[in-house]
Image (cartoon, coloured by chain):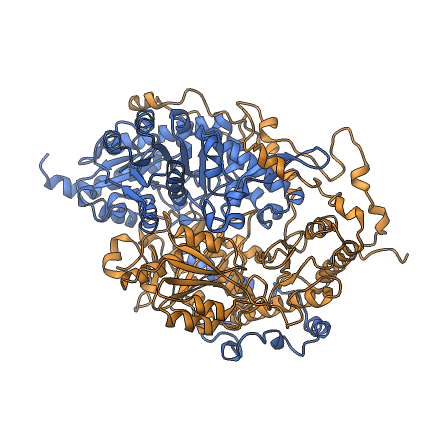
Chain colours: A blue, B orange
Amino acid sequence: MRYLPLTPAERAEMLGVIGAGSVEALFEDVPAFARLPGPVPGLPLHASEMAVERHMARLASANLSAAEAPFFLGAGAYRHHIPASVDHLIQRGEFLTAYTPYQPEIAQGTLQVLFEFQTQVARLFGTDVANASMYDGSTACWEAIAMAGRVTRRKKAVISGGLHPHYIATAATMARFTGDALDTRLPDLAAEPDDAAVIAAIDGETSCVVVQYPDVLGRVPDLAAIAAAAQAKGALLIAVVTEPVALGLIEAPGKLGADIVVGEGQSLGVGLQFGGPYLGLFGCRDKFVRQMPGRLAGQTVDADGKRGFVLTLSTREQHIRREKATSNICTNSGLCALAFSIHMTLLGGEGLAKLARVNHAAARKTADALAKVPGVTLLNSAYVNEFTVILPRDAREVVRELAEYGVLGGVSLGRLYPEAFALHNGLVVTATETTSDDDIHALATVLTELLADTHEGSPT
Amino acid sequence: MSAVNAAGWRPEMSQGSAQGAVTASGDKGLMLEEALIFELGRPGTCGVDIDEPEGAVLPGLEKFLRASAPDLPGLTEPETVRHYTRLSRQNYAIDLGPFPLGSCTMKHNPRLNEKVARLPGFADVHPLQPQQTVRGAVEVIVQLADWLVTLTGMHAVAMTPKAGAHGELCGLLCIRAALEARGDKREVILVPESAHGTNPATAAFAGYRVENIPATADGRVDLAALTARLGPDVAAVMITNPNTCGLFERDMKAIADAVHAAGGLVYCDGANFNAIVGKVRPGDLGIDAMHINLHKTFSTPHGGGGPGSGPVVLSEALAPFAPLPYAERTAEGYCRLIEEEDAGTDHPHAFGRMSAFHGQMGMFTRALTYILSHGADGLRQVSEDAVLNANYVLRSLEDVLDAPFGKAGPCMHEALFSDVGLAEGFTTLDIAKGLIDEGFHPMTVYFPLVVHGAMLVEPTETESKAGLDRFIASLRSLAERARAGDAALKAAPVLAPRRRLDETLAARKPVLVHPA
């Protein structure tokens, strides 16, 4: 076995040192009935690197990858060009094969990266501080709701209909068991997000208001107005950012009054990966830092007075506080945070701003092209790189038909909201710097063809 | 010549060599200092060539535009590559030597797994693509699920949890949903004192009250105390097996039977599955749920603190409650993911959803690659060699380090020592920091809490005997120095990029971001 260095002779020699007659003797604490006499029945035996690679490559080739098709999916996961140096650097063994920096003297690389990452996230979000990462945007969102409950000592969260439905489902799952109340709503197929409904729902019992920015339909809520309304009732505003590239163009949520800003960092450096691993981003005001979940890297000095970094404020965490911890999170998304940080370092603030403009331009072109398709209407009055169009029939079917033509045409609202029939003609379409004019042309052309029958048959 | 070590150097040649020198740059040969990107970068610098954006901003968006670009310095590609490469050299890693962190299973990460995970058919696929375009990805999830179910002798598996603690949460929520479905409201989770901190934290996170159960003198769960505490308010027990003392819970089946008889369920923390994979099926011991850390047993890289992945295998009683999306192979052999759209008919008792998408696909591809490489025979050899290596460490050092449970018999995949016998004023921390100067990553220290000054050594099966012998020689030397009260040890490390860091200062005056 190519990964196991011990030779039979060494095994025998080591058993001699141990004073055991056989390896089997080392398992004497396992009751005999539970010890298998040989390999687990019903499973194949070891295989060569070449054979395994072939098997896996065959499975990989059974998927249509984004690069192989005109691609317009978003809704919480975004395809951006990742500079080659990002993936090269995260594969350095010193990053890839290290663990949580429990021994800071020999983990300054990871710790400094986390400190830089926290700073980048805080500056991007406009928050005072940020942590060293969560699992993904959806779990970070629930953690923020739980944290708002600890800060305000209230248990009712008002959730905008513009929050990604899987984020709502994740929070609802947890809330069911913790006794938190979530005041949720579906999105309306309207040009503007549901700011007014959300503001009207805030009362003296509200711990927090959760608003996605831009929202799941690509619309942009007025965070400043919602923040003011929340503050007036003693509630916190949690802003959720699923597409950090958008923040190159629109104002940072923290600057608009959000108390906690969470997000999905997958857009930068991480890649699509069929949904994971992704990267939860989590920032907040300084005064809430001791209620934060997750790991934090902090600056300090060593015994010679040299600057160095350590994991800090760990009295919030499970390994110290056990059942009184702010969260149960332990292993988080360290390597994804590194990838995000490298990509962000390559871009810089002005590069991110420019990238966001390029994304926006691609989205405008796409929206203009789709708006010309007979039967298609554009919903949004504002968007960055993602918008919603209304089709004349169920968008789920249209998406499947587009795929038959080799076009990955967007995310249907039927996929996201299977129970909400009123939304089923909606299609969320995303364009990024990877979207070419040819891609846009292909989508518009095939869509025109697919909708022709429907449209001709319907009154104009 | 007698004083020349295995690497061909006389030990005295290295005495204080790096620390004594003073250089104008602050760098010392290959020991390189590195500034923060905020000190290196220049506003406006960009390491990515981006086309000039065409056209104007949508009029409707104008009122939302940011006042100025984010205050983030950029670096060109050569500067970026150098920054992170220099930082990487301040890290210890498995690729450099043994990383015997107990309970973390720091084994070699095969590079084939990295190559496979990067195939565009896995890496460049969106989680919401129509299922007709992701058949291979879904099949990876189902094939891995099949392996995990068979290796553990369980009934089903929930694949979506994103790390071990998330898996614990998934298991407890399955348990809670199952109890609620039978109208049974129970509020207490029993957790042994030796448990990892995530166990009680998870139980509290899931809305339960936590009670500790004591350990026996031989480092195992006190079956009598546990049985005495069982009752109609106990929802479940969480048992780590092998446990955090590196010992197999011999009474596991009896514990499970007692808990079941009292109407509760059994959660097994599978963090230490590496000790028994391919050799013992936890399902044969009566458990109801167990998470598997793919980043431990199945070698997906630890990445400086994640990402992990924590699928949870489930008994027949809990399987209906597994969260969405739920991967299954239909009776016709067809692989699919059940999401909300079909859950009402096909998986109606799911307790909900734990995250936005399908779980850690990038970890699934790596873990499946690892599993296929090893096969059922190789995995059995994995656990045997892991246990052999740990016992070799235990018996090679028990004359100089106190092994609290060593007398009673073999350990599993971890050797546990205490600080008993060290000279007055010398601690486990001193030995750990001494290991850093010796060129090793220290073991897990001060955990489990049930042993004073615990040192938990998990060599894993991917260490060679020669590598272990070097580690043992260093640890032996440090143990002898700590027993003899060698004052120089209190200063360790002196040869690392940093000496001991002031953690009190970091916590008292937190600096968590670089000031603007």
The image shows residue B138 at horizontal and vertical percentages of 37, 57
- Residue B309 visible? The answer is no
The image shows residue A151 at horizontal and vertical percentages of 40, 36
Which one is nearer the viewer's eye here, A59 or B231?
B231
Left or right of residue B167: residue B441: right
Q: Is residue A1 above or below residue B423?
A: below
Name the image quarter holding residue A222.
top left
Q: Is residue A181 above or below residue B226?
A: above
Residue reaching furthest to the left: A459
Which one is nearer the viewer's eye here, B37 or B22?
B22
The image shows residue A332 at horizontal and vertical percentages of 49, 47
The image shows residue A51 at horizontal and vertical percentages of 52, 64
Q: Is residue A363 above or below residue B479?
A: above
Which one is nearer the viewer's eye here, A114 or A445?
A114
- Residue A382 visible? The answer is yes
Quadrant housing the N terminus of chain A = bottom right
Q: How many marks?
A: 0
Name the image quarter holding residue B379.
bottom right
Q: Residue at x 44, y 26 (%)?
A: A354
Residue reaching furthest to the right: B1
Which one is nearer the viewer's eye here, A79 or A94?
A94
Q: Residue at x 46, y 74 (%)?
A: B254
Quadrant housing the C terminus of chain A = top left
